[in-house]
Amino acid sequence: MKNRIIRGIAGTFILMSLLLGIYVNENWFWFTGFVGLNLLQSSITKWCLMEDILAKLGVKE
């Protein structure tokens, strides 16, 4: 369950920042890059801040 939520949040962040970058200000593309780097980092280190946040909110595996 937690992995599906994390993927949904990451996908939403990426799509929102792409739309904001196109229609509002191109600096929003930095946020897209940040999300991508965070996904890469979590795949290498097997640690994800969003997973810790969801655990503290009581979301089960």
Image (cartoon, grey):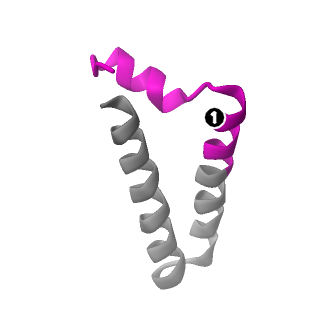
Q: Position of residue 39 (x, y in %)?
A: 61, 44
Total count of labels: 1
In the image, 39: left or right of 19? right
Principal secondary structure, stretch drawn in magenta: helix
Helix, strand or loop at label 1? It is: helix
Q: Position of residue 8 (x, y in %)?
A: 36, 49
Q: Position of residue 24 (x, y in %)?
A: 48, 79
To which residue does mark 1 refer?
A: 42
What is the span of residues highlighted in magenta in the rendered image? 37-61
Q: Is residue 53 magenta?
A: yes
Q: Considering depth in this image, is 1 or 20 the residue closer to the camera?
A: 1
Q: Is residue 29 above or below residue 45?
A: below
Q: Position of residue 45 (x, y in %)?
A: 70, 27
Residue in the picture at 44% in, 67% down: 15
**Residue type, mark 1 in image:** Ser
Q: Is residue 19 above or below residue 3?
A: below
Res 16 quadrant in image: bottom left
The C terminus lies in quadrant: top left
Q: Considering depth in this image, is 47 or 1 the residue closer to the camera?
A: 1
